[in-house]
Amino acid sequence: MSQEPLRVAAALVVGADNRIFFQKRSAQRKLFPNSWDVVGGHLEPGETVAEALAREIHEETGWHLAEVLATVGDYRYTGEDGFERWETDFLVRVDGDLARPQLEVGKHTEFRWLADNELDVLDESAHINDGMIRQLAEDGFAVLHGLGT
């Protein structure tokens, strides 16, 4: 019996200087432990992608969704837990203190704002996520540059 993929909404948060926000997952996480990631998570029952996007941004950073700039793309992958996921990623701007995100205790350990020429740091966890985060970052910057910002 085929199971529908789990839906995921994710945000590539763009700062005033057009850098994108990344956070490192803690070593205790079941999925992609100790790897760089964007903000996001699974949709809750009855929740729309837009609602999940806003909720995840607030839960993971304390910021509030201000504007969706563009859709980066849809990505399908199977996690180490064996579940297929269907993730939609968006370029967004947020309201809040961008210098002081409120990372979820126990879930994320550090953060970085990266420019498009600083993505090599994302490769340090490529063996965990098959280079997916690096690809998301490159796709996000391509969309961002296409917007002319």
Image (cartoon, rainbow, N blue to C red):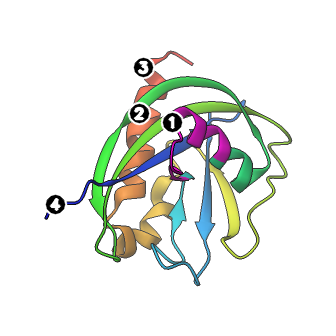
Report, in whole angstroms, how far the alpha carbon at label 3 lies from the one at label 4: 38 Å
Mark 1 = which residue? 48
Distance CA(mark 3)–CA(mark 1): 27 Å
Residue mark closest to the camera, 3 vs 1: 1
Give the number of the disc on residue 2. 4
- The answer to whether 3 is drawn above or below residue 40 in the figure is below
Q: Is mark 1 on a helix, strand or loop?
A: loop
Return the residue at label 3. Answer: 146
Q: Upstream in the sequence, badge 1 or badge 2?
A: 1
Part of the protein shown in magenta = 41-55
**SS at mark 2?**
strand
Q: Is residue 120 left or right of residue 82?
A: right
Q: To which residue does mark 2 refer? A: 72
Query: In this view of the protein, which residue sits in the foreground, 148 or 52?
Result: 52
CA gap, disc 2 and disc 4: 27 Å
Q: Which of marks 2 and 4 is in front?
A: 4
Question: Pointer 4: residues within 10 angstroms few (<14), some, or many (20+)?
Answer: few
Disc 1 residue type (three-letter) = Thr
User: Circle 3 sits in a helix, a strand or a loop, which is it?
Assistant: helix
